[in-house]
Structures are given as structure tokens and as C-alpha cells.
Image (cartoon, helix red, strand yellow):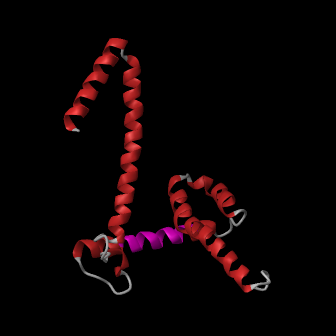
Amino acid sequence: MQLAGDEAIGKFAGLILGTMMGPTIVFTIPVALGIIDKKDRGYLGAGVLAGMIRGFNRFGIGVTVVITALTAIAVFEQITGIMFPLFDQMATSDASTGLTPLDSGLLTCGQSGILQTGRILRKAVQQVYNIMDDCDQAALTRSLNHSRKDKG
């Protein structure tokens, strides 16, 4: 607060810093550590944390372990119905949606997977479509349009 000069500015700066560091610590670092090769972790640390490489690997692994353990507890609670005090937040249903946060997260991941699959399939269909001659393309387009009209 002394650096800001005004308490409101200090709180606002803390809010901005928290909203930037939160996703970095909770999402970017664990996901990136899982994606990149171990030999490239030093470069990741340099890019994400701007020079704070020392201790980065230990911290990232620690965050990954904590997230994995808490997710395992949430899955156990959801499947068995046995709730642990202080750990039941992920397996408790929301009154308005009827979903647990775990369900909501899995739905989001599933929707993302479906979108990625659609993109891959679209590229494959475009490649097959480009191989066809004009007559084949017209027949395929006609049959697809006909099948859509029957369902809608």
C-alpha cells in the first residue's frame, strides 16, 4: 500500500495482479509442464515468469500434485457419495443448475474435445471433397442437403 500512495489504488493493483497471476499459477504452469519436454522447462519458466526460473519446476510440480490430489478427492466423493469435510465443494450440487463444479468442468472439457474433433473431421472431409471431381461433389452436396431437410 505504501508504493501506491492511496489505499484504493493499492487494492486495485492487487486485484489486477491477482487476476493475472491466478490463472497463470493454477492453469498455465501445470498444463504447460505437462505438454512441453522436461529439457524446455527452463525456457517456459523464463517466458511465463520473466526470469523467476529458480524454484519454478518445484513450484509447478507442487501445484500439479495439489490439483491432481484435489481432483481425485472430488471424483471419489462424486462417485461414492462419501463427503470429506472441507473437500466437498467440488462434489456438492448447485441448487440453480443441479450440476456439481466437477460436472461443469467435465462438460466444458468435453465440449472443447468435441470442437477439436469437429475441426479435425472438417479438414479430413475437405481433403476428400477436393479429391472428387465436379460431378461427385455435386452428388455429395445434394445428398447432404437432402438429409438435412428430412431432419429439420
Vertical arrangement, residue 106 with respect to residue 111, above or below: below
Vertical arrangement, residue 146 with respect to residue 83, above or below: above
Vertical arrangement, residue 146 with respect to residue 99, above or below: above
Residue at horizontal 30%, vertical 69%?
Answer: 99
Taking depth in this image into account, of 116 and 13 the one nearest to the observer is: 13
**Extent of the magenta region:** 60-72
Question: Among all residues in the image, which is located at the extreme left?
Answer: 150
Residue 13 x, y percent position in the rendering: 69, 75
Position of 89 compared to 57: left or right?
left
Toward which corner of the image does residue 100 lie, by quadrant?
bottom left
Toward which corner of the image does residue 136 lie, by quadrant?
top left
Vertical arrangement, residue 12 with respect to residue 51, above or below: below
Is 68 colored magenta in this rendering?
Answer: yes
Residue 90 x, y percent position in the rendering: 36, 75
Residue at horizontal 66%, vertical 55%?
Answer: 43
Provide the major secondary structure of the magenta segment: helix
Residue at horizontal 67%, vertical 64%?
Answer: 49
Position of 139 compared to 38: left or right?
left
Position of 1 compared to 42: left or right?
right
Is 132 colored magenta in this rendering?
Answer: no
Residue 104 x, y percent position in the rendering: 35, 65
Quarter of the picture containing the C terminus is: top left
Quarter of the picture containing the N terminus is: bottom right
Taking depth in this image into account, of 55 and 144 the one nearest to the observer is: 144
Residue at horizontal 42%, vertical 32%?
Answer: 123
Residue 134 x, y percent position in the rendering: 37, 13
